[in-house]
């Protein structure tokens, strides 16, 4: 069965731009689960070596771009694109960075509007300089 993705909106929803859909209904397709990515290199030593993360951008705009580029590579490896993402979770160490993230998000997602959750957390596991982590679920075919 071919993939059918429907953006589900409330019956009385106002006509306004939003970076996400309140709900997504998917029929058919193959599901891809993407691990969380940050601005840090995806492939790095364990235990972590802080020097491997020295080139990370220091602002939300740069970290958002780096994290989304990492996500893009993972999606490509599975034969998917940002258009195939149906839901994503966004973890920020400072919620004030959400507007900067949303600007970059719009560049990568265009008209695609996955269901999203955005939360502020104390710290990310990869490196204390990481400001953002994104995981996602995509459906292809």
Image: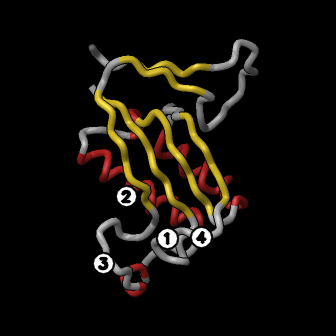
Q: Which residue is mark 4?
A: 123
Give how far apart the Cα atoms at labels 3 and 1 are. Answer: 13 Å
- Identify the image's colour scheme: rainbow, by chain, secondary structure or one colour: secondary structure
Q: Residue at x 70, y 12 (%)?
A: 11
Mark 1 residue element: loop
Give above or below for 88 relative to 94.
above
Q: Residue 118's x, y, as percent?
A: 63, 49
Mark 2 nearby-residue class (10 Å; few <14, some 14–19, many ≥20): some
Is residue 123 found left or right of 96 in the rendered image?
left
Among numbered discs 2 and 1, the one appearing first in the sequence: 2
Nearest the camera: 127 or 107?
A: 127
Give how far apart the Cα atoms at labels 3 and 2 are. Answer: 17 Å
Give how far apart the Cα atoms at labels 4 and 2 are. Answer: 19 Å
- Which quadrant of the view contains residue 17? top right
Q: Which residue is mark 2?
A: 70
Give how far apart the Cα atoms at labels 1 and 4 are. Answer: 7 Å
Mark 3 nearby-residue class (10 Å; few <14, some 14–19, many ≥20): few
Among numbered discs 4 and 2, the one appearing first in the sequence: 2
Q: Residue 31's x, y, as percent?
A: 33, 33
**Numbered mark located on residue 45 in the image:** 3
Q: Residue at x 42, y 36 (%)?
A: 85
Asked if disc 1 and disc 4 are in contact, CB closer than 8 Å, the reply is yes
**Numbered mark located on residue 125 in the image:** 1
Give how far apart the Cα atoms at labels 2 and 1 are. Answer: 16 Å
Please identify, in this view, whether the residue under mark 4 or under mark 2 is nearer the observer: 4
Farthest-out residue, front: 47
Q: Residue at x 55, y 62 (%)?
A: 132
């Amino acid at each position: 069965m071919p993939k059918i993705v429907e953006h589900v909106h409330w019956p009385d929803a106002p006509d306004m731009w939003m970076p996400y859909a309140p709900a997504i209904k998917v029929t058919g397709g193959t599901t891809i689960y993407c691990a969380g990515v940050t601005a840090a290199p995806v492939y790095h030593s364990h235990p972590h070596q802080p020097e491997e993360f020295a080139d990370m951008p220091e602002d939300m705009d740069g970290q958002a771009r780096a994290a989304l580029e990492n996500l893009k590579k993972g999606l490509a490896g599975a034969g998917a694109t940002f258009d195939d993402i149906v839901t994503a979770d966004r973890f920020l160490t400072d919620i004030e960075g959400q507007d900067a993230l949303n600007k970059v998000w719009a560049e990568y997602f265009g008209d695609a509007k996955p269901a999203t959750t955005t939360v502020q957390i104390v710290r990310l596991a990869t490196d204390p300089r990481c400001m953002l982590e994104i995981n996602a679920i995509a459906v292809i075919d």
